[in-house]
Each structure stands twice: as structure tokens, then as C-alpha cells.
Amino acid sequence: MDKKVTCPVMTTTAGSPIADNQNSLTAGANGPLLMQDWQLIEKLAHQNRERIPERVVHAKGWGAFGTFTVTKDISAYSCAKIFSQVGKKIDMLARFSTVAGELGAADAERDVRGFALKFYTEEGNWDIVGNNTPVFFIRDPLKFPDFIHTQKRHPVSHLRSATAAWDFWSLSPESLHQITILMSDRGIPVSPRFMNGYGSHTYSFWNANAERFWVKFHFKTQQGHKTLTNEEAEAVIGKTRESYQEDLFGAIESKDFPKWTVYVQIMPESDAEKTSYNPFDLTKVWPHSDYPLIEVGVIELNKNPQNYFAQIEQAAFSPSNVVPGIGFSPDKMLQARIFSYADAHRYRLGTHYEALPVNAPKCPVHHYHKDGSMNFFAHEAGKLTGHVDAYYEPNSVGGAQQNAQFKEPALKISGDADRYDHRLGNDDFSQPRALYQLFSDAEKSRLYNNIAASMKGVPEHIITRQLALFEKIDPNYAKGVQSALK
Ligand code: NDP
Ligand code: HEM
């Protein structure tokens, strides 16, 4: 070691200096260990607690910090402070991920990619927990655990099962749009830098006049799309399982900061009753010709995490994190996700996950939650004002209070409570057809081959059922897959 480097004295976690970090305490040079070697015990005990549950989905991920800059004024649609001024910059965090693979999975696998963003706004954290696709495989959250079971390992063989995936998909025609994207060139981006992101769901905006708009978010890569064929991906994985981490981390280290242009599509509230498709159906896009992209700003990732575990593994994103001016929609999938994520975080990270530095809002926090494991902060409702007796609400000792100025405009809803068949009369074919028709002949041919490759070992009756669905998109789609299977 360079003699000029002066090292601090190593200590235990309790701060006590350590004299020897090389040799355990033993009875005689070759003798057994002594129980009183509490430094050894502390080291082993800490190591035993280094792993936490991995995310039940989206376990493998890559992330970085950056900024969001407003480039266009959209205050006519949203009063959210994040959009209040052109030129305004907000700190943010991004985490990208594959869906099915575990923490150690290879990066360049064919899968949908997560595209999760946390904006640390002055009115609290706003999270977009989207994907690199504008749609999803299902439209009713009751099917989400079933769908994910088909993507994860078989309970007996402990192998991923193409049969389960295609069995489920062929019985769920609403998956056709997302399958067509997944099996297209965009199914394996070279790295997160070269893919778009989408909020996917319809959310809502409201403006200073309490007018509501429906909104979809788009994040278009400024690096351009770069994708891998199956063969290229196999070659990459043969050399490294960590191609995304290497690319994203490396680009940011070398100051080649990736950027995405942020756009919204805006739908006036009353249009939702007029569109030929349900605008809250997660298996559908809003055609650009009906609802053009409106530029909002740009995101740039320019800072790598200093501690991957603390800042990326412990990052907690949730669609429930919205701020005044941004709200939800009746999308059933979104409604379920509003519950699911915070529940997952409490299990995966603990009760006070939002107090961890990466998740903590960068604005004052005044809530009345109390105690719980690992509470390391002052009580939040009165700490800034010094009103330490304000640990319940209402109180007469100056604790934080609600403020009606942040009230969301009322949302009209109607209908009888029932379980409605979401497949009845739903057109699952027109939008995948529009996408299919965008593909060049070469792209179509790769689509057929990718589907055929992923159907290896799948029983004939499942393939036949799936081909009948492709047929309804376009007879050439079915024919193409059929001949690729041969
Ligand atoms: P447009 O011709 O206006 O847009 C086509 C869109 O398709 C572009 O956003 C393009 O993204 C995207 N695209 C191109 N290749 C792929 C691919 N392999 N996988 C996923 N997206 C791809 O068409 P419409 O708005 O009328 O939509 C037609 C079809 O395009 C839709 O049915 C849908 O499948 C797909 N699409 C539509 C989107 C929307 O919000 N309207 C968003 C994304 C896809 P890019 O501009 O980055 O090249
Ligand atoms: C992660 C549930 C649909 C994007 C997760 C996690 C859960 C979950 C429990 C793990 C959270 C954690 O431990 O931190 C669900 C449910 C869904 C659903 C119940 C449907 C009902 C979707 C959809 C998208 C999506 C439609 C995208 C449009 C993501 C992303 C992550 C994630 C990006 C990883 C977030 C991160 O980087 O930490 N999901 N999900 N999910 N989900 Fe979903």
C-alpha cells in the first residue's frame, strides 16, 4: 500500500477500536475458538443478515440518479409544482429491470423491462413505475399472480416453463399486443440506454381550475433504439451476464449521460366515453393520431449510486406515490398496484422504508405514524415546529394539519358492483394488427422466429390455440409462425 495513505482506525459498529482483524481468538495457536471473540461473532452475524428478500418480480435491476428538466409549459393540464416553470430541474432516481429473472439472472434475456422513476419534488415523491412497453399482458389484476407464476420457475422441475407461458397466453387473448412487442426486435434492448419507457397506465392530471384530464406518459430514448437478436443475446450472455450494469454504469462513469425526452398524451375527461376502446384498458394504447405526443421535458441520468444495495436494491417505487396535480384513473390494474407496492415494501424493506435516504422525500414530512422496528428519526408531525407533544391528530398543540387546497377534483363514478367479463366484446386484435403492419418484412420474419424459438417443447394443442389467435391479427402472422415452427 502507498505509505502516504493514512488509514483511520477500524472499529466495531459500536465504535470501539479493533486491534486485530486477521486472527480469531483461540486457546493456543492451533486451539479452538473462544466464545468471547465478539468481533468474530459480530462479523459472522452481520454477514448472515446481508440478504433481504429480492423483489417478487423485477428482481434484477440497474439504476442511477439524475435530473428532470422542464422544457415546455404544461400548466394548462396540471398544477403539479414539478411542472410549474420551464427550466425547472428536479432530482430523480431511475431503476430499470427485467421482470422474471432472479437477482443473478443474465441481463440480456428476452423479457419486458421495468422503467421505474422517482421524482423528488417539493410536494413529495412522484413515482412512475412503468415498463419499456406501452401495454401489458393482462387487464384485470386478479390474473397478475397467475400470470407471474407462468413466468417464474415450475414448482417441481424448478425450471422456467414455456408450456406454462404459452398455455396462459393462448387462453388470454388480451396478451396478444404485449406478446407481439415482446417477441419483436424490441424484446431485447442492448441496454436500458437504448429503450423507451412508458407510464403505460392512464393517469390523471388536474389544473389550477380543477379541470381533469386523462394522461399517458412516454419517455423516448435520445440514444436511439438498439436491440439484440436472439443469437446476439446468446453471444453476449456467453461472455457476461452483467451487460446492462456494465453499459449503464460505464456510460455514466465516462460522463456519457443517457437522456430521454418526456412526453404526455392528453385526453379531455369527457373523451373517455367516446373512444372506440376503453382508454383505461392497459392492453391498449391511445393512437398518436388521436392524441399526439406533447413534449414536457428531459430526463438525464448523471450519477451512479455510491452503494448499490443501499440506493438501488433498497429503492422502493410505488404507483401510489403521486403529488397534487397528478392522480389515478379507473384502470383496474393501476388500482391494484396502488395497494400492492407499499405492501411489498413493508415486507421486503420494513415498516419505515420511506425513511431510508434513497426513498425519503426531499421536502418536509409531517406524518403521525409512530414507532415500529428501526425507527431512527424524530417524530414527524411536530419536529420542525418544535411541537413535540403533537403525536396524535387533531391536537391543539400546533401539530401538522390537513389543507383543503390540495383536494383532488371529485371523480364521477357509477355502475353496479359486479364481476364484469373483461373479454366480452373487447377487441384484442386491431392494435396488435396496427403494430404488426408497422414491421418491415425482415422484422416480421424475426418476430416469427422469436416466437417459434420460445415455443420449443410446448404441446401441439397449445400451439394450435395460439396460432388461431395470431390468425385473427393477420393470417400472414399465423402462417409466418407456423412455417418458422417447421
Ligand atoms: P404510430 O405510427 O404513430 O406510432 C408507432 C409507435 O410504435 C411508435 O411509438 C414507435 O416507437 C412504436 N414502435 C415501433 N416498433 C415497435 C416495436 N417493435 N415495439 C413497440 N413499439 C414499437 O402509431 P399509432 O399511435 O397509431 O400506434 C400503432 C401501434 O404502434 C399501436 O397499436 C402500438 O402497438 C404501437 N405503439 C403505439 C404507441 C402509442 O402510444 N400510440 C406507443 C408505442 C407503440 P418509436 O417512436 O420509439 O420508434
Ligand atoms: C415491481 C406488483 C403490474 C412495473 C413489482 C413488485 C410488485 C409488483 C409486488 C415488487 C415491488 C418491490 O418489492 O419493490 C404488481 C402487480 C401488478 C403489476 C400486483 C398488476 C396488478 C405492473 C405493470 C407494470 C409494472 C403493469 C408496468 C407498467 C413494475 C416495475 C417494478 C415492479 C418497473 C420494479 C420497480 C423497481 O424497480 O423497484 N410489481 N405489478 N408492474 N413492477 Fe409491478
Image (cartoon, rainbow, N blue to C red):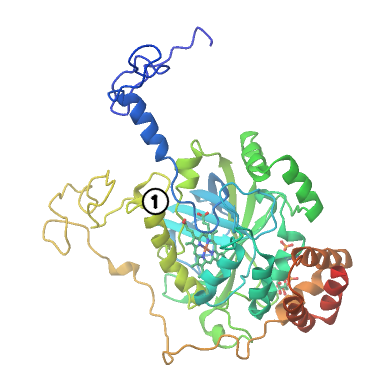
* Any part of residue 285 in sight: no
In the figure, is residue 182 to the left or right of 442?
left
Tell how many labels.
1
Q: Compared to 217, does 386 lie above or below?
A: above
Residue 418 seen in the figure: yes
Q: Which residue is mark 1?
A: 349
Q: Nearer the viewer, residue 74 or 414?
A: 414
Q: For numbered disc 1, what is the local secondary structure?
A: loop
Who's the residue at 66% across and 59% down the image? 111
Tell me residue 297's x, y (percent).
58, 56
Q: Nearer the viewer, residue 284 or 412?
A: 284
Q: Position of residue 159 (x, y in %)?
A: 63, 58
* x and y, in percent, of residue 3 in the image: 50, 7
- Rendered-image quadrant of the C terminus: bottom right
Above or below for 263 versus 328: above
Which quadrant of the figure has residue 21?
top left
